[in-house]
Every structure is written in structure tokens, then in C-alpha cells.
Image: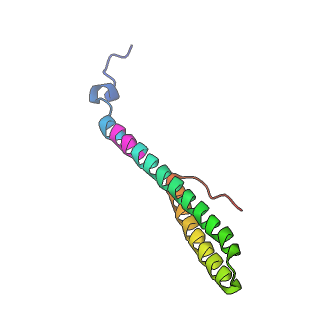
Amino acid sequence: MPNAPVQAAAEGLPGSTAIAYREAQTGVLSRDLIRAADTLHEASDFCEAIFMVAVNLEDREEVAVFQRLAQVAKDRVREAILTIDAIRGIPEVKQ
């Protein structure tokens, strides 16, 4: 047994309340980011559906326009998903 008090025990745990609060905030933030990513994945699926449905249009130029718009929207959604994944610390998957 030491004859002197241990410094950490004498001072208590530094900032333990702040650490717990920060972890609670991160958990909420993480859940919100997961929810946002899920919504963006749904939007990406809708873009894919629009792309596929456009094939049924009669005018080939209209098909091309709608498919291009759907692809551009899907690319933007993918960028947003990658940004959220980066914030969450998830590495980018190479395709």
C-alpha cells in the first residue's frame, strides 16, 4: 500500500461527465446519420426505378433524357451517402 494518496483518485475522474455527454451526442448523431443514409439509399432506389421505367417511353430522345436525369440524381445521392459514411468513419467501398 502506498503511503501517499494516488493523484488520480484524489482529483477524481477528469471530465467524466463531459465524456459521457459527448458519447451520448455522438450516439444520437450516429443514429441520425444512419437514418439519413437509409433515406438516401431509398432515393437511389427510386432513381434506379425511374431509369428503368423510362425505357417504356415511346420517344427515344425522351428515354435518353429521363435516364440521364435519373443517373445524375443517383450520382448526387451517392455523393451524399459517401459524405455521410465518411463522417461516420466508414471507408469507401471500391466499385
Identity of the residue drawn at 60% across and 70% down:
75
- Identity of the residue furthest to the bottom in this view: 61
Relative to the observer, which residue lies in front, 82 or 3?
A: 82
Q: Quadrant of the N terminus?
A: top left
Q: Quadrant of the C terminus?
A: bottom right
What range is drawn magenta here? 20-26
Residue 43: name its quadrant.
bottom right
Relative to the observer, which residue lies in front, 74 or 4?
A: 74
Can residue 21 be found in the magenta stretch?
yes
Residue 91: name its quadrant.
bottom right
Can residue 87 be found in the magenta stretch?
no
Colour style of the rendered protein structure: rainbow
- Residue 27 sits above or below residue 36 on the image: above
Q: Locate residue 73, reporting x and y percent.
A: 56, 72
Q: Locate residue 26, reporting x and y percent.
A: 41, 46
- Residue 11 sits above or below residue 44 on the image: above
Q: Locate residue 39, reporting x and y percent.
A: 51, 56
- Residue 5 sits above or below residue 52 on the image: above
Identity of the residue drawn at 59% across and 77% down:
69
Identity of the residue drawn at 68% across and 68% down:
52
- Residue 49 sits above or below residue 89 on the image: below
Q: Locate residue 32, reporting x and y percent.
A: 43, 50
Relative to the observer, which residue lies in front, 94 or 77?
A: 77
- Identity of the residue furthest to the front in this view: 58
Magenta region, main secondary structure: helix
Residue 3: name its quadrant.
top left
In the displayed structure image, the side of residue 5 where residue 26 appears, left or right:
right
